Image: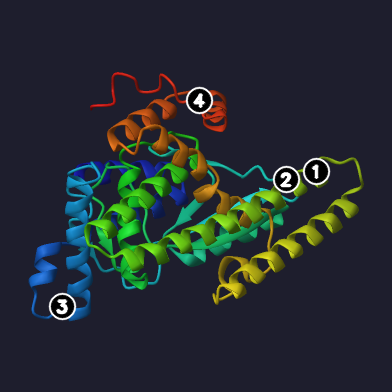
């Protein structure tokens, strides 16, 4: 691991400041790792942290035994980063387009965001993109996956989440080690969200927490309701952006539709007694819409695939893996049409 990071740092010095900060940030995460059992058994560890890490240790075992997720050293250690987020992601899109600005990396391929280990660097990049005419948005990230290339630790930045969200996040990040398609962020995140949903349902059922399951399902449905509002807005905006009217009129149409979306989301949240702030609380733009649809956009299709597999995870993983190996257009067509026949055949018992 040390040799690999040295190579990364040497490459970073040749490739520019971005890769240098990325390699340095990853090194910080890894060098601060402490085995979970050492943190849990340390008498100086805060009892609240001990309780949460014990819960995650149980969830990690569950992920292997009941969900078939990788049995490795990922999330078997803890890193205290002493800040609110591990990275800050910058999203960008042209003023009159919902096609995201993409960045490409040696391991992850091309993704629809640029991650920075320092918030100031993310802000600097967002200002540069805004000056170039892009809509931009910055979001703090509690965790990320290195796709099994390193033994990712549980991070102190994850501790701001409630217990069930922590378990869900663990399942989500491990899912990226099972199926990952370079250059397709929407596919990857929607698949991981599907695994997260399946995992949480089974986790709660195994513990007999049926009231909590009902609450979880209601929360998931609210997220899907917001995703549907965003998708409807995207459809309307595509019409506006593709029209032949002057840019001034496009800008007016865009602003009106985004204001309407913000009001719709606020009304939905207020009806459920939720805070109307957060990602949708400020001014909306194309970049914020892109980041929202990454995690939910293809989720209904993965739910359909899971049902087609009669809720058997080995079948689900094999067919999702087969989809990941397709070309982008063929993959999207198969997902949209629900055409899963023949996918992963002969692999379902692996």
Alpha-carbon distance for marks 1 and 3? 56 Å
Circles 1, 2 touching at the beta carbon (< 8 Å) = yes
Q: Earlier in the sequence, mark 3 or mark 2?
A: 3
Circles 1, 3 touching at the beta carbon (< 8 Å) = no
Residue mark closest to the camera, 4 vs 2: 4
In the displayed structure, 8 sits above or below 171; it is above
Q: Residue at x 17, y 73 (%)?
A: 50
Which residue bears the numbered disc 3?
A: 45
Alpha-carbon distance for marks 3 and 4? 51 Å
Q: Which residue is drawn at 68% across and 53% down?
A: 286
Q: Position of residue 14 (x, y in %)?
A: 41, 42
Q: How crowded is mark 3: few (under 14 residues within 10 Å), some or many (20 or more)?
A: few
Q: Position of residue 43 (x, y in %)?
A: 8, 79
Q: In which quarter of the image is the C terminus?
A: top left
Alpha-carbon distance for marks 3 and 2? 51 Å
Alpha-carbon distance for marks 1 and 2? 7 Å
Which residue bears the numbered disc 1?
A: 239
Circles 4, 1 touching at the beta carbon (< 8 Å) = no
| Secondary structure under the numbered disc 1 in the rendered image | helix
Q: In this view, does 290 lie to the left or right of 319?
A: right
Q: Residue at x 70, y 50 (%)?
A: 232
Q: In this view, does 109 lie to the left or right of 230?
A: left
Q: Is residue 32 visible?
A: no
Alpha-carbon distance for marks 4 and 1? 28 Å
Disc marking residue 235:
2
| Secondary structure under the numbered disc 4 in the rendered image | loop
| Secondary structure under the numbered disc 3 in the rendered image | loop
Q: Which of marks 1 and 3 is nearer the N terminus?
A: 3
Q: Earlier in the sequence, mark 4 or mark 1?
A: 1
Q: Earlier in the sequence, mark 4 or mark 2?
A: 2
Q: Which of 98 and 65 is in front in this view?
A: 65
Disc marking residue 339:
4
């Amino acid at each position: 691991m040390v040799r690999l990071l040295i190579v990364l740092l040497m490459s970073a010095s040749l490739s520019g400041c971005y890769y240098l900060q990325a390699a340095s940030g990853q090194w910080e995460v890894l060098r601060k790792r402490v085995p979970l059992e050492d943190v849990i058994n340390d008498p100086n560890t805060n009892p609240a942290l001990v309780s949460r890490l014990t819960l995650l240790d149980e969830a990690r075992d569950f992920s292997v035994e009941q969900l078939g997720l990788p049995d490795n050293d990922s999330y078997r250690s803890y890193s205290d980063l002493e800040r609110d987020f591990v990275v800050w992601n910058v999203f960008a899109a042209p003023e009159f387009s919902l096609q995201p600005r993409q960045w490409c990396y040696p391991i992850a391929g091309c993704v629809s965001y640029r991650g920075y280990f320092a918030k100031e660097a993310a802000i600097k990049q967002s200002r540069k993109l805004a000056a170039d005419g892009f809509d931009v948005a910055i979001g703090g990230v509690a965790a990320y996956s290195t796709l099994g290339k390193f033994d990712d630790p549980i991070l102190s930045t994850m501790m701001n989440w409630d217990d069930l969200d922590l378990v869900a996040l663990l399942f989500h990040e491990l899912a990226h080690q099972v199926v990952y398609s370079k250059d397709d962020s929407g596919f990857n995140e929607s698949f991981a969200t599907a695994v997260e949903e399946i995992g949480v349902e089974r986790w709660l059922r195994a513990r007999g927490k049926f009231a909590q399951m009902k609450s979880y399902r209601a929360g998931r449905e609210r997220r899907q309701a917001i995703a549907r509002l965003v998708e409807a807005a995207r459809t309307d905006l595509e019409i506006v952006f593709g029209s032949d009217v002057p840019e001034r009129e496009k800008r007016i149409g865009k602003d009106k539709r985004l204001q309407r979306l913000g009001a719709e989301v606020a009304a939905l949240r207020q009806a459920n007694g939720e805070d109307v702030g957060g990602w949708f609380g400020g001014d909306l733009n194309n970049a914020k819409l892109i980041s929202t649809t990454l995690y939910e956009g293809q989720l209904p299709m993965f739910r359909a695939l899971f049902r087609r597999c009669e809720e058997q995870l080995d079948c689900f993983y094999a067919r999702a893996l087969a989809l990941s190996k397709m070309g982008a257009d063929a993959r999207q067509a198969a997902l949209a049409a629900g055409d899963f026949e023949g996918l992963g055949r002969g692999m379902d018992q692996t």
